[in-house]
């Protein structure tokens, strides 16, 4: 994987992209009302992003409500580990797409988008409770421990797999489940970088642009040449090297999940039939996502003035 280094102008553009993306999802959170669907929310995010002068995406908006914020009943896409045990091929991410699931009072909400600003990409995830939900509020507070934990691991030059395990142990100690394990490759994070949008038109595939896949492919080319090269643009439990210099979007995602099979809650449409394990009303997940800048001799979060960080300060949550 290439080692990426950026100018101060580049870093300012990445920071601005991240700031505008968070501004957009917070604006949508304030507008969403009971009865709106995940698809409505995704369209609203797109409108807010375009209102801020951005038209291209690392990935287009996602929105998850209620039990879907915990990815309960969703298997990791592209994961062949359970095949053929389940006698079905792995899904390819369709279950993450925004659905007609309707927003209800007290539901957890996650709004996630990754726009591109002046060819610089950022990926953000904003979680909150629609109305009062003390359990969601506590989980949002508990997310604070992961920000210094991840940074400390990077500064100690731990491997990404070791940091992944540190995060996993911490969330389990607090009684949560690992929801980021459901992302493709189970990633805790991934690289973001400069994507030359002028070279390719906007061609979306599963809400990711083709230009994004080409960026990731370029990052992975060394692994194709040398199978023993464990460097990768994806931060997973199997990444047994330290993070290369560059920009990484990290996204610890924790959840409260009640395992079992029950009738689907009224008013909830997850589409495409019922999974073997149906989400239970009361299941939820929360996350934050932001860019960490790693250089040859230091690491730091690109911006400390982000909604989740400011929330912890206002609530006097230890970070």
Image: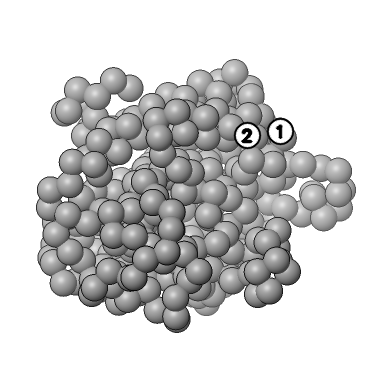
Residue 273 in the image: state x and y as whole percent: 44, 80
Q: Residue at x 86, y 43 (%)?
A: 228
Q: How many neighbours does mark 2 have within 10 angstroms: few (below 14), some (14-19), or many (20 or more)?
A: many
Residue 34, numbered circle: none
Residue 199 in the image: state x and y as whole percent: 58, 69
Residue 83 image-quadrant placement: bottom right
User: Is residue 88 left or right of 266 when viewed as pictured?
Assistant: right
Q: Residue at x 33, y 52 (%)?
A: 284
Closest to the observer, 89 or 223: 89
Closest to the observer, 136 or 53: 136
Q: Residue at x 35, y 34 (%)?
A: 143
Residue 145 image-quadrant placement: top left
User: Is residue 169 left or right of 144 when viewed as pictured?
Assistant: right
User: Is residue 138 left or right of 150 when viewed as pictured?
Assistant: left
Q: Are marks 2 and 1 in contact (CB under 8 Å)?
A: yes
Q: Which residue is mark 2?
A: 160
Residue 241, numbered circle: 1
Q: Mark 2 or mark 1: which comes first in sequence?
A: 2
Closest to the observer, 224 or 149: 149
Residue 47 visible at all: no
């Amino acid at each position: 994987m290439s080692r990426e280094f950026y100018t101060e102008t580049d870093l300012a553009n990445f920071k601005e992209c991240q700031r505008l993306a968070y501004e957009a999802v917070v604006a949508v959170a304030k507008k969403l009302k009971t009865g709106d669907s995940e698809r409505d929310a995704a369209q609203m995010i797109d409108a807010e992003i375009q209102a801020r002068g951005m038209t291209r995406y690392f990935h287009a908006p996602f929105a998850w409500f209620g039990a879907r914020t915990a990815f309960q009943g969703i298997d990791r896409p592209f994961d062949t580990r359970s095949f053929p045990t389940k006698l079905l091929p792995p899904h390819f991410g369709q279950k993450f797409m925004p659905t007609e699931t309707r927003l209800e009072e007290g539901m957890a909400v996650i709004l996630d988008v990754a726009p591109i600003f002046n060819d610089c990409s950022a990926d953000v995830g904003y979680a909150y409770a629609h109305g009062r939900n003390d359990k969601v509020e506590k989980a949002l507070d508990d997310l604070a421990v992961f920000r210094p934990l991840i940074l400390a691991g990077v500064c100690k030059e731990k491997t990404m797999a070791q940091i992944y395990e540190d995060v996993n142990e911490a969330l389990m100690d607090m009684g949560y489940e690992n929801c980021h394990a459901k992302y493709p490759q189970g990633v805790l994070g991934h690289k973001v970088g400069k994507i030359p949008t002028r070279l390719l038109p906007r061609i979306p595939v599963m809400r990711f642009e083709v230009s994004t896949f080409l960026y990731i492919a370029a990052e992975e080319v060394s692994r194709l040449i040398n199978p023993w090269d464990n460097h990768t643009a994806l931060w997973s439990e199997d990444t047994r090297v330290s993070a290369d210099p560059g920009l990484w979007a990290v996204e610890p995602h924790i959840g409260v999940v009640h395992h079992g099979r029950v009738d689907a809650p009224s008013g909830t449409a997850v589409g495409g039939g019922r999974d073997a394990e149906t989400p239970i009303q009361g299941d939820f997940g929360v996350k934050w996502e932001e860019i960490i800048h790693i250089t040859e001799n230091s690491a730091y979060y690109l911006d400390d003035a982000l909604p989740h960080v400011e929330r912890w300060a206002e609530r006097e949550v230890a970070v």
